[in-house]
Image (cartoon, rainbow, N blue to C red):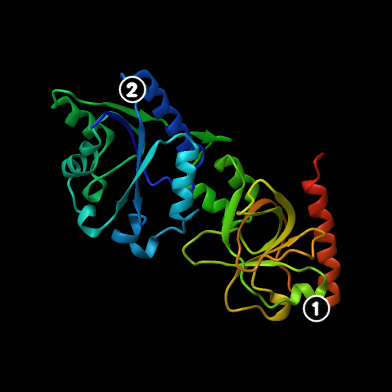
Amino acid sequence: MRRSVVLIGNFDGVHLGHQSLIDRARAHATALTDDEGPLPVLAVTFWPHPTKIFNPEHTPKLLCPLPERLDLLTSNGVDEVRVVQFTEEISGWSPQQFIETILMPLNPAAIVVGENFRFGKKAAGTPQDLREYSAGLSDGFDVDEVALAEIEHRVASSSAIREALQAGDVETAAVNLGRYFRVRGVVVVGDQRGRLLGFPTANLPISSEYEVPADGVYAGWVRVLDDPDVKMPAAISVGSNPTFDGVLNRRVESYVLDRDDLELYGKWIAVDFVAQLRGMIKFSSVDELVKQMNKDVEKTRELLAPSA
C-alpha cells in the first residue's frame, strides 16, 4: 500500500481548527511526494461520538450528520476518509493496540494531530506515544502535533460552537466554522398556519441528536439541494410556536422572502443561519404576531441585501 499522511479526530463540524489540520496535512503530503505525486491525505474519524460509548449521559449534540462531515472533509482537501465504528471494545484498547489496529494499516509517512489529541483506554495515549512507537520502526512516521487554532483569542472548537449556538449567537458560530452554520433535512408538512398568515414556511423537524440555534428568529439563506447554487433569503424561526401553545417538538421553519409559489414538500433543503433577529416571544394576539413577522421580514431583507 502506498504511504499516506494521516489525520485523526472527531472532526465534528469541520471548523477552522480542523481545517488548519487539513492544511498542515496537505503541506506534508506535498513535501513527501513520491513517484505518483503528493501522498494521499487520509482522515480517520469516529462514529458514533466516543463519549456516547464511555459516558453516554454527557454525549454532546453534534454539529452535523456523518455524511455532511465526510463531504466537508473531502471538500476541504482530504483525499479519503476512514470511519471507525467506535465501540466499547475499542474504548478499552491500549494506545499501542490503537496504533497497530487503526493507524499502521494506513502505512503512514506522517500523522497530524491537534495538541490535545488523546487515544486509547482512559485517553492515556498522547502524541508522544505516537513518536515513541515510530522510533521503534525501521521505516517510521513523522508526528506533527499542531497547536490549536484560535479565533478572536479563543480556541476554535466544537464545544465553543455549541455554546454559541445555544445562546443564539450564530455569527460567532460562523466565525469559528468558517462558514454559516447549516441545518439540512427533508421538508415536512407542518400546521400550514404560516400560509394562512401570509408567510408560508418550509418546515424541518429537529433531531435531539443535533445542535441547532436557540429558540428565536433568524435571517438566513435557504438552498434546495437539487440546485445548491441558488440561495434564497429567508426569515427563519426555531422553536415550538408559543403563541399557538407550541407543538410537541421543536422545528426550523423558513419563510423565503416574497415567495408563495415554492413546492418544497419532500425535498432536501439546507438552511444557513446568518444572524439572530430576536428571541422567541409569545404574543397575546395573532395580529401582534403578524405585525412582528412583517418587521422580521424587513430586517431580514436589510441584513441580506448585497450592500449589507
At horizontal 20% and vertical 25% (from top left) the residue drawn is: 140
At horizontal 49% and vertical 43% (from top left) the residue drawn is: 72
At horizontal 61% and vertical 44% (from top left) the residue drawn is: 174
Position in image of residue 275 (x %, y %):
70, 51
Residue sitting at the far bottom: 245
218 up-or-down from 37: above or below: below
Q: Quadrant of residue 176?
A: top right
Q: Earlier in the sequence, mark 1 or mark 2?
A: 2
Position in image of residue 219 (x %, y %):
73, 54
Q: Residues within 10 Å of mark 1 (few under 14, many from 20)?
A: few
From the viewer's perspective, tell me whether residue 161 is left or right of residue 26.
right
275 up-or-down from 154: above or below: below
Identified by mark 2, the residue type is: Glu
Q: Quadrant of residue 127?
A: top left
Provide the residue designation for mark 1.
284
In this rendered view, identify the residue nearer to me: 90 or 172: 90
Provide the residue designation for mark 2.
36
Position in image of residue 225 (x %, y %):
60, 54
Identified by mark 1, the residue type is: Ser
Q: Residues within 10 Å of mark 2 (few under 14, many from 20)?
A: few
Q: Secondary structure at mark 2?
A: loop
Position in image of residue 254 (x %, y %):
70, 62
